[in-house]
Image: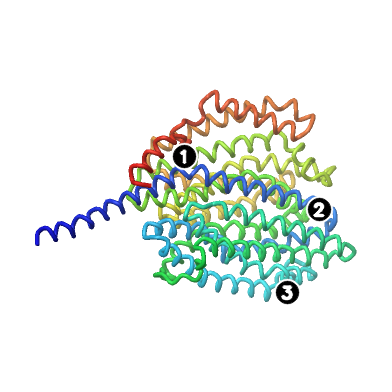
Amino acid sequence: MRFRQNRRCVPVKSARVRIRARAHFCIHMKAQSFIKGALIISVGGIVAKLLGALYRIPLTNILGGEGMGIYQMVYPLYCLLLTVSATGIPSGLARLVSQAEFSGARASAGVLRKSLFLFSAIGIAGSVVMFLTAPAMSALQGEPGAVNAYRALAPSVFLVSVISCFRGYFQGKSNFLPTALSEIVEQAVKIGLGLFFARAFAQDVRRAVEYALFAVTASELAACAFMLILAAGDRGRRPLYRELPAQPRALSLLRVTIPVTVAAGILPLSNILDSILIVRLVGQYAENATALYGLYSGGAATLVNLPVSVCYGLAAASIPAVSAMQAEGKNAEAEERVLFAVKCTLYVALPAAAFLFLFPAQISSFLFPSVTGEEGTALAGLVRALSLAAVFLSLVQTLSACLTGRGKPKVAALSMTIAVAVKIGAELILLRIPQISVLGAAYASVGCYFVALFINLLYSIKERKNRVRVYGQFAKFALLAAAAVAAAYPFGRVHALAAFAVTAAVYVALSVLFRAFTGEELHIAWRKKHDNRRRIGV
């Protein structure tokens, strides 16, 4: 009898050891894949944003100022509804899936299945709202011809909701390639169909805009089909969305995603207010208020968001990495992961901001050659004024993701709410001053992101010594970035690309010379990882 009891106990004990070893290995592999995942999403974001920026140039030439004005009017409401129905999904689901992975693939598949049912319904509601409110929004903006443009874009809200569920699922499993590829698919289809329709209906501007926006819907449909194919192949013959494992409650999904959605939805809401405040307040003393708003939102903000998009990969990769450590109760290790994500963000964002500050005219003339004269000068001034926002917004994005991974998404939502309130108050004061004009919106945005950054930093990094480390890293990379752009200054007269190449080369060389990153930080200790695999029998 004793022998039988021992035989029964040994396998149980061994199973527990294997489970613990497997959990430890999963955390280790997530940490090792942090850089790789961030690079994959960053490269995908760079390619997607570059394609999008290049797409705007011929589209502007075809549609003209009136057509692009209608095109831009539709996007604030679209972005707001998109935020409500989809933006918080990838971050929230990535955290839930990364925690469910410890229970096996079927548990994470249950999270995906439940999220598809829940957020598809929310996405359908968003599409209906956009379709039905199109006449009211068009009348409010003073452009009745935008009704069909709103309706052509309405189905995209539902499609992006579905896509976001799959992106959150794959990101939670530290598989960032589907997100990157789907973004590229979106841009490729949008560019191909958008330019085709714009040229086909170039004689009728409103119709050309409607079909160009329909191309956005078609691109989301293509990306949705692409993600469905990837999900079907993730489990072989039985697609993930047909799994019937234990599913989480809808309330648990909403508790995670709603705060993230609120944090992300504040900015699109502020953009809608910008479209009203800038045009109305600046219009009191300037006749080209609409054009100035277009330069601010469609030109300067687009350029500043390029480095922010690159840093999005760091934010997305931070959630499963931080969440896995937090789930194990390793708070110190989780904070170290936050510090590393912040360091990587500073390393990318600071030289980009310095480059935007020193070469705003060269960048603007290169990417927007049709904007010349007084408008070109105004655009360059806006780019320089907004350059520091590239650093602050990138850090806010990363720290908000880290707060989500640590189970504090409400802090990110609260910080962004306070920051946007500060921004609106500053705009109400600055935009009334003719000497400042639309630059007041740029200054208010920089202040907004700084306030959000300050609050997020207090709650995401508790140790005072770690905050001091962040300040030191900021100073170090700022000096390296300043030296790099200073070395490239003579090449700015040649071409913006020449100045960019010199800046990048000098910055990388200085980073190696002054050891910006250690080998341990970059996770290049392959031998140690290999030994861990062998020790647990992989």
Task: Decide: is 411 above or below 362.
Answer: below
Query: In this rendering, would 124 be left or right of 406?
Result: right
Residue assigned mark 1: 340
Query: In the shown orientation, is residue 390 left or right of residue 91?
Result: right
Give the CA separation, mark 2 to mark 1.
45 Å
Ranked by sequence position, the earlier of labels 2 and 3 is 3
* Position of residue 149 measured from the top left corner of the image (x, y, whole percent): 75, 68
Q: Quadrant of residue 458?
A: top left
Disc number placed over residue 392 in the picture, else none: none
Please name the amino acid that badge 1 sits on: Phe
Q: Farthest top residue?
A: 513
> Which residue is found at the position 62% from the left and 45% from the top?
43
Measure how far apart labels 3 and 1 are at the Cα level.
Answer: 48 Å
Residue extending farthest right: 203
Residue in view at x 75 percent, y 56 percent = 191
- At horizontal 79% and vertical 45% (from top left) the residue drawn is 368
Q: Which residue is mark 2?
A: 288
Measured Cα–Cα span from mark 2 to mark 3: 25 Å
Counting residues from the start of the chain, the first of labels 2 and 1 encountered is 2
